Amino acid sequence: MNNWIPEEFIEEVRRQTDIVDLISEYVMLKRTGKNYMGICPFHSEKTPSFNVNPDRQTFYCFGCNTGGDVFSFLMKINNLTFLEALNRLAERAGLELPEKELTPEQKERRRKLKRFKEIHEYAAAYFHDVLLNRPEGRVGLRYLAQRGIDTNTIKFFRLGYAPDQWDGLLKELQSKGVSPEELVEYGLAIKKSRDEQGHPSYYDRFRGRFIFTILDSRSSPIAFGARVLDDSLPKYLNSPETPFFHKGHNLYGIHYAQRGIRERGYALLLEGYMDTIAACKAGFTNAVASLGTALTKDQAKLLKKYADKVVIGYDSDSAGVKATLRAGEILLEQGLRVEVLILEEAKDPDDFLKNHSAEEFQAKVDNAVTFIEFKYYALVKDNPPRAITDKAELVKKMAPDILKIKSAVEREGYERFLSLKLGLSLEAIRYEINSLAKQTKEKFIKTENFSLKQDISVKNRNTIGGTKIDSIGDSFVPLGVIRAEQMLIRLVLDNPDFKIKVLERLGDDFWRLKEHKIIFDNLPDRSFIGFIHEDLLYQRIQQRLADIYELEIESTEAQALLEDCVSSIEANKNRETIEEMQARMIKLEKSGDIAGALAVLQEIGERLRRG
C-alpha cells in the first residue's frame, strides 16, 4: 500500500512536472494550435496521432486510444509502478520522496536491495573497464572484433570481460568496501572450504570469460551471463538466482527493446545473447532473449505488456525446434499471436546476419509462419502421418493450440489448413477439435461449481453495487451505456453543479464501469490518491479520463444532453432489472419451485405492460 504518501506531495510533483517537457524526452513533439502532436510511442504509425494537451496536462493517441497523465505515461512507457514513476518524477523535479515507517525486516530488505544494485553496478563497471581499457581484456576485444561487434555496441550493452584470475573481482570490489561474503551472497563469488588455518577462502565465479551484462527495464545491472572463448565447458555460465534476481522474470535486451517492441508492434524473441546483439545492431530494436533457460510464463506476461504479437527466432537445430514448440505454447496461453522465423540458410539469426543484409532479415520476419503451421510441419517432419489413426492422433496434438486461438476466423483457417494437409473433411477436423474442447470443459465443470456461477451471472454483471467485480471489461457493457456514462462525466467536468442533479435522479450505484464511478465520485477534485497502490487500475482510470476529455460538447446544449444521458441510463437500469428477474425465475424453476417461477413471470409481464 502506498497510502502513506501525502496527497499534497503527489499534487506538488504533478504541478512541477510539465507533461510537454516530460513527453518530449521520448517523443518529438510539434506544436499545432494549443496542443502538441507527435508519433505515438505506444504503437506503430507513420502519421502523427499522439496529442499532448498542456492545459489539462494529459496525453491521448487517436490511433490506439491510449491516454492519461504524467504518471500513467511514465508507468506505461517504462513499465513502472506508480510509486516508481512518482519517485522518478520527484527526483526530476528536485523533490525528496517522504520516508515511510518500515518494520525492521523491511528496512533490512531495502538495505540489501540497495546493496545488491550497488555491487552489481560496481561489477558491471569493472568487467566493462577490463574489456575496453586493460591488457587482460584484449583477448575479449579480439573475440568481439571477429564477431563484428564495434565499440558503440559494446558500450550500449555494457559488455565486459572477466580476466582469467581467481580473485580479480574480489580485489577490485574489496577496494570499494565490498566484502567477500557479500559477493558470495549476491552470486559473484564462491566460498571454498576452509584452509589449514581454518579461515574461509573465496574465488571469483566468472574467470576467463566474456561477460554479458543483464540489465533490467531501467537499465540497471542485475546479473551476468559469461561465455568461454575456447571449447572448454560449460560454454555458458550464468548468475545464480538470488532474492533479487530471478531468471524467469527478466529478458535480455529489455532495457532498450521495450520501446522498440511498442514501435514495431511485435517482439522478436531470440535464443541467445549474441543473436539479440546482432539483431539490435542491424536495426531490430525489438529483439530480446530468454536468460539461458526455457521461456517462462512470467517472461511471456512481460512481453504482453508491450505488444500482442511475438515472432520466435530460435536456433534451427532439434533443440531449438523443441524450445520453439514449448515457447509457442506458453505464449499462446497468454493470449499472444505467435509466429516463427524460418532461416533455412543459417543456424540462428546471428549467423544469418553475418552473411545477409538487414533488409533480407526483415523479409524473413515478414514471411514468418504462424505457430500452428510451424508445429504441424515440425510434427510431420520425422513422423509423416500415413494411416488414419496417425492423422487422428496428429489432430489431437494440434487441437489444444488451435483452441487457444480467440479469433473464430483464425481458428477456422487452421481447421481448413489441417483438412487440406491431411486429406480429411473440414467437418471431421472440426468435430475432433470440438470433442476435445467438450472433454476439457466437462473436466472443468467437475472441479468448479459452474451451475452456481451461471445462476448469478446476471447479478455479476458490470455494476459497482452488489457482487464485487475485480475487473470490468467493455465487451460486457452496451456501447450506448458507455457513451452515456462518459458524457455524464464530461458534463460534470464542465458543470460541477450537475453532479448533485445526477445523484438525485440516479443515485450512486448505477455505474456499469468501475473506472467511471471512481472518476465521478472524485469530481471535481480529480484526486485518485486512494488508487495509487493499484497500478493497473490507476492507469485504467487515467485512460478513461483521457477518453472522456476528448468528447466535445456544446455548452448551450449541456442541460438537454444531461437529460438525455440520465433518461438513457434509467431505461437501461429498468431493462437490467427484468434480466435479474428472469435469472431468478430460472433459478426457481431449476430448484422445483414452479409456483415461485410463475409468480416472477407474472411480475415480469406486469413490468413490461407498465413500460
Image (cartoon, rainbow, N blue to C red):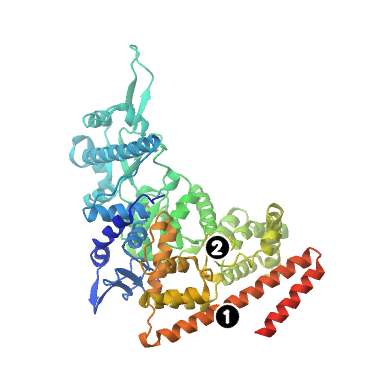
Query: Is residue 54 visible in the rendered structure shown here?
Result: yes
Q: Quadrant of residue 580?
A: bottom right
Where is 19 relative to 189, above or below?
A: below
**Residue ID at (24%, 43%):** 141
- Residue 179 is situated, as x and y percent measured from the top left of the image, at 28, 28
Residue 470: image location, x then y, percent: 53, 59
User: Given the current orientation, which residue lies at the most extreme top position?
Assistant: 197
Q: Toward the viewer: 453 or 297?
A: 453
Callout 1 secondary element = helix
Q: Residues within 10 Å of mark 2 (few under 14, many from 20)?
A: some
Q: In this view of the protein, which residue sits in the foreground, 250 or 456?
A: 456
Where is residue 483 drawn, in percent x and y?
47, 78
Q: Secondary structure at mark 2?
A: helix
For the C terminus, the image quarter is bottom right
Q: Residue at x 43, y 59 (%)?
A: 536
Horizontal relation, residue 131 to residue 329: left or right: left
- Residue 284 makes an appearance in the image: no
Q: Quadrant of residue 405?
A: bottom right
Give the amino acid type for the residue marked by disc 2 in the picture: Glu
Q: Which residue is mark 2?
A: 373
* Disc 2/disc 1 C-alpha distance (Å): 49 Å
**Which residue has dot 1 on it?**
571
Relative to 343, residue 117 above or below: above
Looking at numbered disc 1 in the image, what kind of residue is underneath it? Ala
Q: What is the total number of numbered labels drawn onto the structure image?
A: 2
Q: Nearer the viewer, residue 60 or 501?
A: 501
Viewer-side residue, 152 vs 302: 302
